[in-house]
Image (cartoon, rainbow, N blue to C red):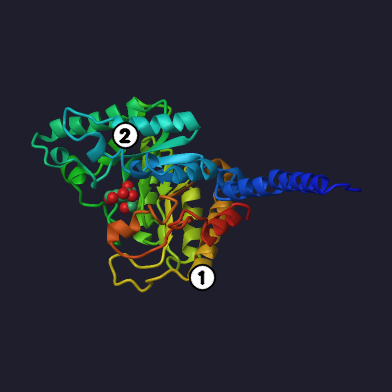
Amino acid sequence: MNFNTQLQRKLFATVILNVFIAFVIIPFIGYSQQSIKPKPGRLAAIAHFPIGSAVGMRWLERDSVMVSLLKSDFNSITAENCMKPALIHPEQNRFNWTDADKLAEFCEKYNFRLHGHTLIWHSQVPEWMEKFQGDSTAFEAVFKDHIQTVISRYKEQTKSWDVVNEAIADNNGKWRKTFWLERLGKDYIARAFRYAREAAPAVKLFYNDYSLESDSLKRKLALKMVDSFRKQGVPIDGIGLQMHIRVDHPSLKEIEETFTKFAQTGLLIHISELDISFNEFKKEPRFKAFTPEMADRQKQRYEDVVSAYNRIIPKNQQYGITIWGFADKYNWIRPFFKQPDWPVVYDDSLQRKPAWYGFSNGLTK
Ligand code: 9MR
């Protein structure tokens, strides 16, 4: 190319510069902006079963990055708090549907499966319910009315519910001594399931508990309960293994045995509240900062648990794996126990941790 004048040279240089800006610089800026968005390979797209998260209203309405990660990685939601008795039924003659309605609408709009949590629990109960003065017939009516009113309101939107939560005591294989047990007798659990089925026949009904993978006495009683429900025709569809576990406890062997035993019930099996922490609850924390070695250990543990579920639970019983709040920033452990920990798959800056990759590897093993 011949440039006869200095003006022609200048013009040519300007054209080249503009082309460079238009085709190289601008797309590059676009790319780097995109790179803060979730990268491809959503967990829910890799999995053969639903992948869930507990969702708290405190971030659902305020943290758009969390919401975009929720939409990109997950396809099932458990109500973290807003459907619990204390929040949804604050006074005997008043239900507060506001947040639960919002969550149900969100799930409908963005096509998430909604898992209700929880109808009957000894914790997060309104004072009026716990201190109710009437006789046992009147208390039975309160119990039945609560279950049926809440489950039937969302019977189109919730595919499933934790009907009874944590009714077994720790380390003694007995029923937990709660005001429900004391006032309604041990068959209250069976009656809760019957009332729930009566009000919402198409909704899948779960019993949900923690430490079933580490407390053999608790596990034994839960299995015995399922067996006796079957004999009595009590309508139960699934078991929620919460699995708030640690990187070093319990052993993978015990987890695998737990999966095998519960799979033998033929019920749906939901890992319903998964998180994998480092420090023991309510003890002086051994781990004060999150190191790359800890991240690798946690990655392996997520991979082991997810792949064990994938392999051991028959496909038609895999109700899915729910992480209890998928970012360390919002997980319950730090605020609840007031101690450091890093239990889930996104970090405090909402970036994927090695644990995310462990989880996703487990889905294909
Ligand atoms: O994540 C929930 C947290 O925000 C509440 O403060 C806490 C109150 O007990 O409950 C947490 O969720 C629990 C769930 O409902 C039942 N299994 C144990 C969960 C962690 O505590």
Residue 11 in sight: yes
Mark 1 vs mark 2, CA separation in Å = 38 Å
The image quarter in which residue 235 lies:
top left
Residue 76 image point, x, y percent: 48, 40
Query: Residue at the location (38% across, 64% down)?
Result: 341
Q: What residue type is labelled 2?
A: Asp
Q: In which quarter of the image is the C terminus?
A: bottom right
Residue 166 in sight: no
Find out if the beta carbon at label 2 lies less than 8 Å from the nearest ligand 1 atom.
Answer: no
Query: Residue at the location (39% across, 41% down)?
Result: 60
Q: Nearer the viewer, residue 120 or 8?
A: 8
Query: Residue at the location (28% across, 61% down)?
Result: 337
| Mark 2 surroundings: few (<14), some (14-19) or many (≥20) residues within 10 A | some
Mark 2, residue position: 99
| Mark 1 surroundings: few (<14), some (14-19) or many (≥20) residues within 10 A | few
Mark 1, residue position: 292
Q: Nearer the viewer, residue 329 or 85?
A: 329
Q: What residue type is labelled 1?
A: Pro
Left or right? Give the position of 107 relative to 193.
Answer: right
Residue 68 image point, x, y percent: 49, 42
Q: Nearer the viewer, residue 163 or 225?
A: 163
